[in-house]
Amino acid sequence: MLKDKALEHFQDEIAQCVRCGACQAHCPVYLETGREGSVARGKIVLAAALLAGEIGLDERLREEIGLCLLCGSCTAKCPNKVPTDAIVAAIRRRITENQGLSVLGRGVAALTGGSKPLLGALVKGADLLAPLLFTNIPEASSLRLRFAPAALKDRSLPPLPKRNLFARVPEFLEGDATQPVVGIFAGCALTHLYPHVGEILVRLVHRLGCSVFLPRTQGCCGMPATSSGNGPLVASLAKANAGAFAGRALDCILTACASCHAMLTGYSPATVHWPAAELVDIHVFLLRQGLGKQLAARPKWPHRFRVAYHDPCHLRAAGITRAPRDLLRALPQADFVDMEDSALCCGLGGTFAAAHPDLSRAIGDRKVAGLRASGAAVIASGCPGCILQLQDIIDRAGLAVRAMHTLELIDQALTGPPP
Amino acid sequence: MLTEHILQRLASIVGPEHVATGTVDRITHSFDATQQQFLPDVVVHPGTTEEISRIVQLANEERVPIVPRGAGSGFTGGSLPIHGGIVLVLTRMNRILEIDPDNLIAIVEPGVVTGHLQKEVERLGLFYPPDPASKDFSTLGGNIAECAGGPRCVKYGVTRDYVLGLTVVTPTGSVIHTGGRTMKNVVGYDLTRLLVGSEGTLGIVTQIILRLLPKPEARKTMLVAFASIDGAAQAVSAIIRGKIIPTTLEFMDGAAIDCVRRAARIDLPLECRAVLIIEVDGDRALLAGQAQKILDIVRPLGVLETRTAETAEESEAIWRVRRSVSPSLRALNPHKFNEDIVVPRSRVPEMIRLLEAISARYGVPIVNFGHAGDGNIHVNVMVDLDQPDMKDTVRRVLDEIFRTAVGLGGSVSGEHGIGTAKAPYIAMELEQPTLAAMQAVKRALDPNNIMNPGKIFPPDIAEHTGCAASPPPSLDPYHA
Ligand SMILES: Cc1cc2nc3c(=O)[nH]c(=O)nc-3n(C[C@H](O)[C@H](O)[C@H](O)COP(=O)(O)OP(=O)(O)OC[C@H]3O[C@@H](n4cnc5c(N)ncnc54)[C@H](O)[C@@H]3O)c2cc1C
Ligand code: SF4
Ligand code: SF4
């Protein structure tokens, strides 16, 4: 796994970069800045210079290394698959080791792991915290940090849920003995911000006959910590999460958040004894369980709306692009359109949106043209972070479009008004 | 290092946020796709022709080298600051200023990415044909400076054929306008043609008037597998004699097919030693007939199999075979020397056979593919430089390849330019008086030799004509 390898051990990957520049066409940050330091190629050259001792971790270097969404778009199109996101993450860890955490990084640490009471609050999922998230504790939520505190006052936020996911569903739901036993890793966003989506996730899987285990001791996946270069915190979150699922025989562990999926698949086996259960994205799982056919067999609604899909970078990078589309195509209440630039990054990028709110928005606004041209009334996605960011992009552009999780549409299809 | 005074004047021209002298910025502007590295003293991102004119005047007064840079995707070192100085990055100047469907022209700034312009004009039913493989990231300024070409050039020609006029800042800082908005224009010397392909040594292009075409309605892709490279080459000639000009005529030789075969399952007959990928475009109603005619022409020439794409996906599958060549080369050896020779179309088979002989003689794999329709062969010499004496072997192999190409009436570079990488070979092809004429032009426009110095002309020639010498080419290869 590349996730916690030190920069020194990336020599070979760095040498694979042939400086062709192809990544320029795909890097969301470069498309905005047009500066060589923003793009994968520039960062790889800087990584090489760092290893050669030609430069130090000075302020300019920290700036350039900060300008990365860890989206993996460059790697996907790179002829040699140079893992720039992993290399940037390694440089960020080195910066942290040498110079300590940034203000933002300290915020992430305080919220997702560092300070006992908040860790406890998040991990145990206290009902208390949810209503406070965006009102009484202005700087005190990992969600806030991920979702651009600097720009929070004038951005679109979902209505604040009163009860989090753990207060809505039991820890274990017994299913059909012939069906898989699945664990669910909900992640911060589906636990606290969009708990109704988390609830759909749990209940839908249960409805399909599975036994569902949602351990209360799961915490943050560690994406914000990775983004801010906090290696030790990532390691301790990984351990805590592995522990949460240990001790129960599971056929698989499901995620409905692209970023969580990417983080969990990247946990280092050297430091974490992750349960043997396979990690599966919810879209892939539902198709496997035959939900696509079930949906397609339902009578089409007479009044349908158009739905487009946004590829979360972290699903695209894992090669999961067809499953969500297959599910959306099968929906009886909507007509799927593949919008132009569906794979363009929304601009959120871990702590990127918090550190560079203007740039993050400029990157996100590139989605508007394709979305408008698609004529969609709904844009679905498989990542709560993207959904939050997309709604903000849509509202600023004044479009009449709703950003929704694919799961919400599936739930609508199964429970909505009969046609 | 540049004096504080010069840096201050640069900052006052473009604004301090667009002038960078820190090591980080110098390092990120020290390379191009040749993988060589030379540090500039300062990196400047100008925004207007006026700013560029003032910067060049300053550079000329102070005798500071100045190197224009687009996307830095060049394969021959054109944007490397080999003598330090100013790297002038044109990516901020990336506006499409006008698309005029009545006169079929587009006016753009030099930092516009080729593929971006193509997308925009195609929305309006128009077409900008030049399609270098780097079109998704290379800039039009860079395309013009290198006269970039691509597979479509069989039918549509290269960048040169689409440039109607230019705004250029000359090496002394004057702003000149060449050509214009009209298809016809014979007033004075054709400076447009002189500047296209001048590799940033005669001035900085700051605005471009491009010719457009109506977008062809449809296209059709075919793959034809041959038992020998001769069959494929005869097919190319036969098609052209048959009065059909396909959009593209791409070939892969036996070595390339072997590489692809090793890397992935492709269903080509085992005896297949050459592949042609042929594309035709035009009115939908005419395409099926054209495709059939081509297949009829080639069938007697040792064809093992033909495949015609009926859908966009099938066409994509055919192109994927061609695109999978480059990535598959790494299995042969870690280091790649990618040369871009061109020979008269009819001599492609002879060239391939000679390349096979060179490969056998030196014991290094050479894989060839490219644009059969115009004789442009991408020759990939695959080596492991860690083997003893390999650097020397590579030098001799390359030397022999270029000599052979020139011997067949060809050229050492079809589309990548000379820069520093090919400078040692230019005299194989151009006679002394021709070189002297070129250098006279250079000296007349750039008396102080500040504009991208050390490019095109090799050290020995440059020395006795007064153009600053380029360093000897280093053998930094691409890792395949
Ligand atoms: C993967 C890959 C595939 C490629 N495929 C092709 C291909 O199919 N066909 C082909 O022809 N080339 C190809 N190239 C080479 C390269 O992309 C072209 O030469 C391209 O035109 C360079 O454009 P650029 O913007 O990157 O220019 P740069 O590399 O930045 O500069 C190239 C030269 O142009 C000069 N220059 C740049 N902008 C200006 C300006 N505004 N005014 C004056 N001079 C300027 C520079 O000084 C330099 O000499 C390929 C390169 C790569 C990496
Ligand atoms: S696409 Fe890959 S190999 Fe090419 S410059 Fe970018 S990182 Fe390097
Ligand atoms: S990971 Fe994304 S933001 Fe970072 S360099 Fe690659 S494409 Fe750019």
Image (spheres, rainbow, N blue to C red):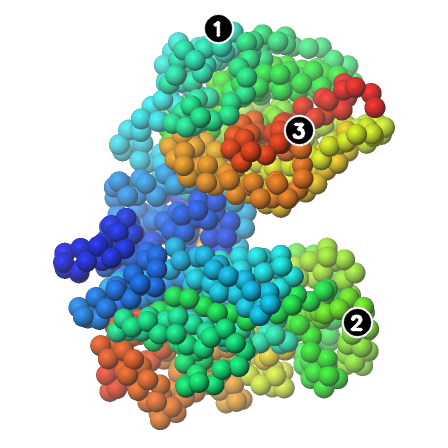
Q: Nearer the viewer, mark 2 or mark 1?
A: 2
Query: Looking at the image, which residue is at 38% across and 27% down?
Result: A150
How far apart in space, not on screen, are marks 2 and 3 (Cα)?
44 Å
Q: Judging from the image, what secondary structure is the residue with disc 1 in?
A: loop
Q: Chain of mark 3?
A: A
Tag 2 and tag 1, C-beta contact below 8 Å = no
* Residue identified by numbered label 2: B286
Q: Which mark is residue A406?
A: 3
Relative vertical location of residue A337 with respect to residue A185 in this rendering, above or below:
below
Residue B27, position as x, y percentages in the image:
30, 54
- Mark 2 or 3, closer to the camera: 2
Looking at the image, do the residues carrying marks 2 and 3 touch, with CB atoms under 8 Å apart? Answer: no
Is B453 positioned to the left or the right of A337 in the image? Answer: left
x, y percent for residue A76: 54, 47
Mark number, residue B374:
none
Give the residue pinned by disc 1.
A128
Question: B145 or B398: which is nearer to us?
Answer: B145
For the question of whether residue A304 can be seen, the reply is yes
Marks 2/1: CA–CA distance? 71 Å
Amino acid of disc 2: Leu
